[in-house]
Image (cartoon, grey):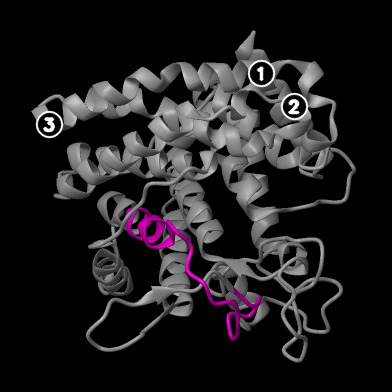
Amino acid sequence: MTDDLAQNLMADFADSTGLSGKTTPRRYLWTDAFAVCNFLGLYRQYNDDRYLQLALRLVDQVHHILGRHRDDDPRCGWISGLSEEEGERHPTRGGLRIGKALNERGAEQPPDSDLEWDRDGQYFHYLTKWMHALHRMAREAGERLYQQWAVELAVTAHNAFTYEVSPDRPKRIVWKMSVDLNRTLVPSMGHHDALDGLITCLELQATAQFEPGEEVGLTRAIAETTRMCERGEWATDDPLGIGGLLDAATRLAQIVFEYQVEHRHLLRQLLIEADVSLQFFARSSLLSYSAERRLAFRELGLSIGVQGLTLIRSLVNEDRELTALAEDLLEYRPLAEQIQTFWSDPAHRQGSTWTEHRDINTVMLATSIAPQGYLQL
C-alpha cells in the first residue's frame, strides 16, 4: 500500500511540475534533488525503465532551466557565462539557481529579510543536495559524466561560497549568493553548511574515478571544510535540521565502512549530537498539533533521517562504541513511522500548510516511504 503511494506521489509530482504531460516545467532545486533520487529508487525497486527515464529527463530540465538565466532577467544564456556549446558540456560550472518565484535582489536594492525568502539566487546547501543527486544518477545510470558534473559543481560552490576571515582561522561559508555567484546576498553561515560540504565532497572523492588533475579542487575543498568542522557543534531542535544531521551520519557511515575513509571521530560526534537533538525533539509537543499547525516537509526530513539509522547500525558492527551509539538512536525509529503515517492520511494533505508547499511535501513524503534511492551512496 505504501509503495503504491510513493509511486502515485511521484507521478503526481511529474505531472504537476511539467516533467511529464503538457504543463510548463517548474523546477526547484531542493525538491528536484530528492525527486531524482526517488525515481532512481523506484527504478531499482521495480526494474522499470520508465523511472530511469524520468530521472534523466529531470536532470536535463534542471540544468537547462536552473543552469540558465530566468525569462524575466535581462541576461540570457548559461549563468556560468559559458558559450552555448561549452555550457552544454559543463552545465553545473556556474552553479544552479534555487528556482524561487521572484528574481534576485538587485545590487542597488536594500536587503529585505522577509522578501529574501522568495527571491532567487543560489544556496550552498541546495547545491550539495544536487551533487548527491548527480552522484546517484552516475551510479544507477552507469554514466561517469554525471559524476563529473557533480565534482565541477562541488568545486564551483566551494570557491564561490567560502571566504577567509583571517589566515589563522577556518574559512566561512555564506548562506546565499547571487545567480551569477558574483555577489553575496545573505552573509550569515548555515548551521550545517560546512558539514554538508565536507560529507558531500568525501562522498564524491570516495566513489569517483578521476582523470589526471581532476581531483585537485575537490581535495582542497575537503581540506578546508574539514578545518571548518573541527570545532563544529551540530545539535539542533529543528526537525529538518535533525534529519539533515542523521542524513550526514548515514552517508558518512557508508564512506567510512564501505570505502575505508578514516572519519570515525566525526561519525561519533554526529551520532552523539543527533542523540541530543532527538532527545529534545521527543520532549516537544510538535507531533500532537493539527496539520494546519505543522510543516510536513520539515517533519518528513526528520523521518527520512531516522530511517538511515538502520543502515548505520548494520555498518558499524566492528566498532563497539559506534554500535552502542547507533543502538541507542534506534529507539527513535517510531518517530519516523508516526510522521509518515500522519502525512500519508489524505485528510491531512488538504490544508494550506500542505498545498502551499505541495511539491516539496509530495516529494519528501515519497522519500520517507521509499528512502533507499536517497539514503544509499
Q: Residue at x 84, y 26 (%)?
A: 350
Q: Are the residues at dot 1 and dot 3 in contact (C-beta closer than 8 Å)? A: no
At label 3, which amino acid type do we have?
A: Glu
Q: Position of residue 6 (x, y in %)?
A: 65, 22
Q: What is the number of the mark on residue 322?
A: none
- Marks 2 and 1, how far apart in space? 9 Å
Q: Residue at x 83, y 84 (%)?
A: 74
Magenta-colored span: 177-200
**Mark in front: 2 vs 1:** 2
- In the figure, 122 relative to 267: above or below? below
Give SS at disc 1: helix
Q: Nearer the viewer, residue 331 or 370?
A: 331
Q: From this viewpoint, is residue 118 visible?
A: yes
Query: On the image, numbered disc 1 is attached to which residue?
Result: 342
Q: Nearer the viewer, residue 197 or 146?
A: 197
Q: Position of residue 170 (x, y in %)?
A: 28, 76
At label 1, which amino acid type do we have?
A: Phe
Q: Are the residues at dot 2 and dot 1 in contact (C-beta closer than 8 Å)? A: yes
Query: On the image, numbered disc 2 is attached to which residue?
Result: 291
Residue 255 in the magenta stretch? The answer is no
Q: Earlier in the sequence, mark 1 or mark 3?
A: 3
Q: Are the residues at dot 3 and dot 2 in contact (C-beta closer than 8 Å)? A: no
Q: From this viewpoint, is residue 319 visible?
A: no
Give SS at disc 3: helix
Query: On the image, numbered disc 3 is attached to which residue?
Result: 321
Farthest residue to the top: give it.
1
Q: Earlier in the sequence, mark 2 or mark 1?
A: 2
On the picture, is 178 further left or further right than 132?
right
Farthest residue to the right: give it.
22
